[in-house]
Image (cartoon, rainbow, N blue to C red):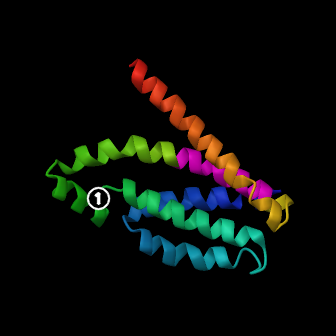
Amino acid sequence: VIRMLVPAFVFIIAVVLSFATGTSWGTFSIMIPIVCNIFAPTEEMLAITISACLAGAVCGDHCSPISDTTIMSSAGAGVKHIDHVRSQMPYAIMVACVSAVGYVVAGIIGYYANSALAMIGLPIMLALVAGTFAVVTKKTKSD
């Protein structure tokens, strides 16, 4: 049962590791060999978990104040670095939360279903993203 939650755990670990180190590529090099040894090459969960690793690493790198891309973005925009980090954080956290739920859904579907049924996770996640977008834009308009 815990195997179905592995993609979500890998996503969260990759976010934290990438945020702490400021590098997505470094996180890839640490996490992908570990992920590849968790599942057999023929399992559906391998692709889902590698995807979670890549997405988590990029998300953490995007939020990290010590990331080279974040530093260059704030310098290029001509704003104070910490202000740029603070302005990006709410968007990245919202997307990370939706993605974590998505990896739980994908893990459950990938664990119980065959490869043909695994594609049902995509419309489920699109609906979740659309619902989140609708709630956020409604709250923004009312504020």
Q: Is residue 37 magenta?
A: no
**Where in the figure is residue 53, as x and y percent of width and height?**
57, 66
Amino acid type assigned to the residue bearing label 1 in the image: Thr
The location of residue 56, given as percent across then percent down, is 52, 60
- Measured as percent of width and height from the top left, residue 62 is found at 38, 57
Q: Is residue 79 left or right of residue 57?
A: left
Q: Which residue is mark 1?
A: 70
- Magenta-highlighted stretch: main secondary structure? helix
Q: Is residue 121 left or right of residue 71?
A: right
- SS under mark 1: helix
Q: Residue at x 70, y 72 (%)?
A: 46
Residue 50 position by quadrant: bottom right
Residue visible at 57% across and 43% down in the picture: 129
Residue 57, position as x, y percentages in the image: 48, 64
The single residue placed furthest to the left in the displayed view is: 78
Q: Relative to 37, does residue 14 appear above or below in the rendering?
A: above
**Residue range corresponding to the magenta coloring:** 96-109
Q: How many marks?
A: 1
Q: Is residue 26 above or below residue 97?
A: below
Res. 38 image quadrant: bottom right
57 or 141: nearer the viewer: 141
Around disc 1, counting alpha carbons within 10 Å, would you say few (fewer than 14), some (14 to 19), or many (20 or more)?
many
Residue placed furthest toward the top: 142
Residue at 42%, 43% in the rendered image: 91
The question of residue 104 being in magenta is answered with: yes
User: Quadrant where the N terminus lies?
Assistant: bottom right
Quarter occupied by the C terminus:
top left
125 displayed left or right of 42:
left
Say whether residue 74 is visible: yes
Residue at 85% across / 61% down in the picture?
113
Is residue 101 visible in the rendered image? The answer is no
